[in-house]
Amino acid sequence: MLELDDVYKSYGEEQVLSGVSFEMDAGDVDVVIGPSGSGKSTMLRCVNRLTEINGGDIYLDGDCITDADTDVNELRKQVGMVFQDFNLFAHLTALGNVTLGLRKVRDMDKATAQEQGYEHLEQVGLLDQADSYPAELSGGQKQRVGIARALAMDPKLLLFDEPTSALDPELVGEVVEVMRDLAAEGITMLVVSHEMGFARSAASDIIFLDDGQIVEHGPPEQLFENPQAARTGEFLSRLETAHEEE
Amino acid sequence: MLELDDVYKSYGEEQVLSGVSFEMDAGDVDVVIGPSGSGKSTMLRCVNRLTEINGGDIYLDGDCITDADTDVNELRKQVGMVFQDFNLFAHLTALGNVTLGLRKVRDMDKATAQEQGYEHLEQVGLLDQADSYPAELSGGQKQRVGIARALAMDPKLLLFDEPTSALDPELVGEVVEVMRDLAAEGITMLVVSHEMGFARSAASDIIFLDDGQIVEHGPPEQLFENPQAARTGEFLSRLETAHEEE
Amino acid sequence: MGTPESTTSGRTLRARAAGLTDQPLTLLTVGVFWTWLVVRWTNDFLLDGALIERNTSFFPVGPFEAAAATLGALAASLGPVGFPVGWLAGFFEFLAASIPYLPQLATGVWATILLTVLGIALGFLIAVPLSVARVYGGSATRLLALGYTELFRGTPLLAQLFVLYFATPLTTIIRELPAVGTGFIPAQAFWVAVIAFMLNSAAYQSEYIRSALNSVPEGQLTAARAIGLSKVDGIRHVVLPQGLRYAIPGWSNELVYLIKYSSLASFITVRELFERTDAIASETYRYTELFVLAGLLYLALVISASLVMEYVEDRVAIPGLGTTSR
Amino acid sequence: FGGGGGDGGDGSTEITAGTAPGFPPFEMKQDGELVGFDIDLLEAVVDETDYTLAGWEEFEFKSLIPALTNENIDVVAAGMTINDERDETIDFTDPYYSSNQAIVVREDGDFSPASLSDLSGRAIGAQKGTTGESTIQSELIEPGNLDESNYNSYGNYVLAVEDLQNGNIDAVVIDEPVAQTFAAQRPVAIAFTYETGENFGFGVRDGDDEFTQALNDGLSTVRDGSTYQDLTNKWFGQQ
Amino acid sequence: MPPFPLQSDWAFVAGNLDLLLAGTGITIGLTAASILLGFLLGFPAGAVEVYSRGPLKRAVESAGVVLRGTPLLVIIILLFFGLSVSSSAFVTATIALGLRSAAYQSQIFRGALQSVDEGQLEAARAIGMGRLQAIRSVVVPQALRRSVPGFQNEFTIVLKDTSIAIVIGLGELLTVGQNLYQGGQSTAALEIFLTVSLIYFVLTFVTNRSLDYVDDHFSIPGGERA
Ligand SMILES: Nc1ncnc2c1ncn2[C@@H]1O[C@H](COP(=O)(O)OP(=O)(O)OP(=O)(O)O)[C@@H](O)[C@H]1O
Ligand SMILES: Nc1ncnc2c1ncn2[C@@H]1O[C@H](COP(=O)(O)OP(=O)(O)OP(=O)(O)O)[C@@H](O)[C@H]1O
Ligand SMILES: [Mg+2]
Ligand SMILES: [Mg+2]
């Protein structure tokens, strides 16, 4: 479904990704963890080509999508993205956010787009808020609109970049719930997140990225209970300092 | 040391605090938890009179500090505050942040103020960053400067308003550590925080605030293991949804 | 944030905003312009014409005229393809025509600079309390400050100059002051213009500063008060140092505006750059050349001001303050 | 200039005149209407020719010559003195009025000069681009009798007289008929007149000879009849 | 006729109010035409400064610097007498004011476009929009709302600067006012200036309040006020 093959990426002097390779199958939910600055966001952004890579290849359903002649707009319809800061279109209602892509990218007429828009808002439990503007929504609601907006394009793969880290602790639950539902529906997702609860219960694989390299990659049980690399263990223990005894 | 006696506070029509009463002794560390909008921040801000109350009294070391003739600037020297968003003075270095109060409020000369400033930066482990501007610091470092700034005024009581919730997960640890050290030194602290690890291990008492009222108040073991009110249990379980199985 | 990358991106942002001011050619031109001005002023004002007689240009007209003639002939001989040479000839013709007027214009430039600098600096002293009153004042002071700004921004500067000069006893009062109009100190009309520019630009400056103060996060003042600073001290030591930095780009705009609007002082007989140009033009009828020349001198002043403000902004820059997103 | 001269007038017989109101009684606005001696006179003169006057355009005085050379207008009737500098740029018709410069002072003031040399050391004013200004330049400033900083130039006579009343200047140099009207209306007086022997003429484009000739012919017809005298009586009263 | 009938100064102003109002009409027309021209040129120029690279951007920036750096008085005189762009004073004044305003409006729109969070453009691209389309459907609608305050300022400035058109003889408000007291009928110079100022003040006040209303009307519920 998705394959990264020896991907390199640098910004000027700074090497951000150094030979990243992994594969995921349709229906997989892979969770990426790693310290700040390790290249997690960059890796996601390479997959829908918001950032261009310097070396290696990325394949989606067997097609190399990092060729120069790939139509990036076409690619991005197939790869949805959910942002940490939501990035909802501030001048549009929740429904407007979800339907903009349908109307301007998929060229749907207004009525059909709205119909589909309502469906996706229902999917994330926000039918009631269809006419609210982003500034009128809570963080958790914003993020769910962000998810609905990505789903509306009917993507093969959904990317999530720390979808809950800008949320109040008690609002995290509602977004995690929606993600869990999507996972259960078999939607393929690549998720950067440090929500350990979600990672343990919903992830097919955990990918630990450090300094632009995949240090460890495996199912959650193995990675959490029995980390192979010393760095993985160290990072996990740092993550838990604050939550100890819990 | 600190006593709130039947404190009421409203913003216009909206009743934010409705008869809040509790006491804490010197050396206590009380942790306040509760849903968003329940009045936690408002309660803290009443204690150093960043917000004025509408009813009841607040006593600090036996003096009523909510009298009209209390000198608020004098009071605020005795009650330090650490903010969720740090609120570091953006135009001053770490050292400048710590010494501004010493120089302009305590009227110290520059050399003495700097000497003390360095001491407090050392206390939070930031001597190396004395000359960095806020924008050059990581979140955890910023918050530690915020703590040093409050400590510099040599307050009787320190207020913390969600000091870690704006931090990257792996940076939370360093701030919690500093707070734990302060607790160990016997500094009196009133902390709004949902860091359960810290609450369990360092709190003398937990105060659960809901809808402007204290629903439950007791030592952490009792409150977490055996919540008396249904609402407390419900809130705690919502808090843990995202972290379940951890 | 605060990494070397973000500092450089801040700098490119600013350079972009300034447009031409980062080109070496511009810097060279500005350098030549100021050297000429300073030498001219020193000669005319301080040395009493020791280097060269007042009103006599440093540059001889002859060579430029000769060059223009030669190039003109060359252009003619080249036929239709000679037009770039023709332009060059026109340029030299323009220079030759301009040279005799340069000394008088340099005197006008001096008055323009003095008017602008005094007007903006004195206006600043009013603008800061005015903007603080708008943002932090009680309802009465707020209203008063609002009234002031609306009044001075809502009526033409020309009308303000007129009222102050012809309809108030200001000229009489200033005229009676010792030393006014003698030696270096300009006569009353100049000072009336300075007062008008001060009052008018204070209104505009206060708007820029006000919006900059508003962009200082509220938490900054809260934090200042939380360590025991009074409101006034908090504004003074925390909000203003940040707000004034945010205000620099807008304030620079106002400076540029004032340089150009100082030309209106000619209306009340102040002999600044525009008045000088106009006077020479109405004597010689060489409107086009003279106004192009005046335009170039104003442009040089404006670019110089932008350069100075860029330097100031750079000097007082603090990582993370004002360089992003503006 | 002058290369294409003549095409403004002879292509069609319609001409546009330009003036600068604010110079009573030669030209001014009353109730929104342009009126004055120049206005009536030029209309009478053009009536005597084959041309028709399409209308008037108003400018600042100093903009009139550029407007003329630029073909915005075809003739200037604005109390414009014929002098050499102007003659280099444009042409003039025969003179239609002779005027001297009057030196105007405050009526109640203690300053009563009797000759130009009495003005030295005093602050004096004139309207920019007028004969008054050139008189000050050539008779006072250039010989060194007046410091340049003592001369104030105004966009308009009215402002100069206003400033005289304010006390910022001690004398104004203006065309004599204009000075008389001011003296009649304001607390100012004519101290003395300076004989320049200057003449007003209508300004026309350099090389527009046919048109100039027509205006000159018209002017002599008007002068020979009673019209000219009628207009002088109307606008200069007792003269 | 007596050339100088004596009248009370204020009565004189009142008697000539119709003329002043006619001048006001020209002032309003000139302002509207110039602002419109300024917008039509200034908005694309601002967009070019933000989104384009290379010679086009450099050209737009340089033109902006020159236009912003030269006094309007000089621009008007050059266009009328130097380049003779049109024999109509109204057209020339509109072009001069419009070009100058375009240079300033481009900066207003540049700032507004830049102030829209980069994440907005990114999010639009992430759902498959082309760059141009993303700018048009997501960035521009937000930027236009944010430029209202800057636009208000610019409007006020253009309105008052129409008075400079007096140098090419355009009979707008200030010219009419000057002609009145220079007509020799009255010494009401101060009264005329005060009246003219009042008219300008009313015009700026009314336009600013109307633009406030427009701003309110188009503001995004719950969103920040620019
Ligand atoms: N546009 C850019 N230009 C230059 N450097 C960049 C850019 N984007 C990211 N970087 C750098 O690349 C490195 C990796 O950044 P990235 O955002 O991928 O990390 P991350 O793992 O997502 O971190 P975080 O957990 O903080 O989001 C960092 O050092 C960052 O400074
Ligand atoms: N300055 C204010 N003006 C009006 N209402 C306010 C103000 N500050 C707070 N409120 C209201 O008071 C209530 C309590 O707010 P408070 O910030 O104390 O809650 P909180 O418990 O700290 O919430 P959170 O966890 O989101 O920080 C909220 O409904 C809020 O809208
Ligand atoms: Mg990231
Ligand atoms: Mg709070």
Image (tube, coloured by chain):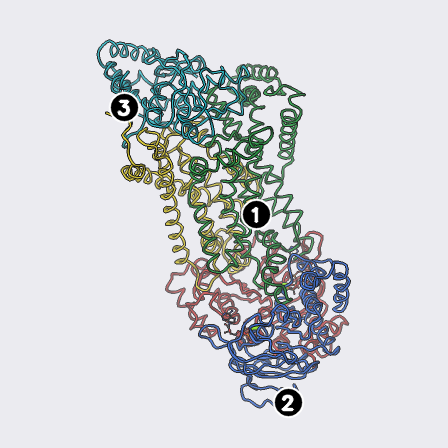
Chain colours: A red, B blue, C green, D cyan, E yellow
The residue at the far left in this view is: D226
Q: Quadrant of residue C23?
A: top right
Nearer to us in this view, D181 or C50: D181
Identify whether C107 is placed above or below A62: above
User: The disc numbered 3 marks a residue on which chain?
Assistant: D
Front disc: 2 or 1: 1
Nearer to us in this view, A37 or A75: A37
- Looking at the picture, how far across and down is residue C290, in whole percent? 51, 25
Nearer to us in this view, B94 or E117: B94
Neighbour class for label 2 at 10 Å: few (<14), some, many (≥20)? Answer: few
Label 3 – label 2 distance at C-alpha: 102 Å
- Looking at the picture, how far across and down is residue C12, in whole percent? 62, 47
Nearer to us in this view, C35 or C118: C118
Query: Contact, CB < 8 Å: mark 2 with mark 1?
Result: no
Circle on res. C125 = 1
| Residue, disc 3 | D54
Ligand 3's quadrant is bottom right
Residue at figure coordinates x 43%, y 67% from the top left: A132
Q: Quadrant of the C terminus of chain B?
A: bottom right
Residue at figure coordinates x 58%, y 54% from the top left: C243
Label 3 – label 1 distance at C-alpha: 55 Å
| Residue, disc 2 | B222
- Looking at the picture, how far across and down is residue D32, in whole percent? 28, 32
Q: Please, what is the three-letter code of the amino acid marked with disc 1? A: Leu
Neighbour class for label 3 at 10 Å: few (<14), some, many (≥20)? Answer: few
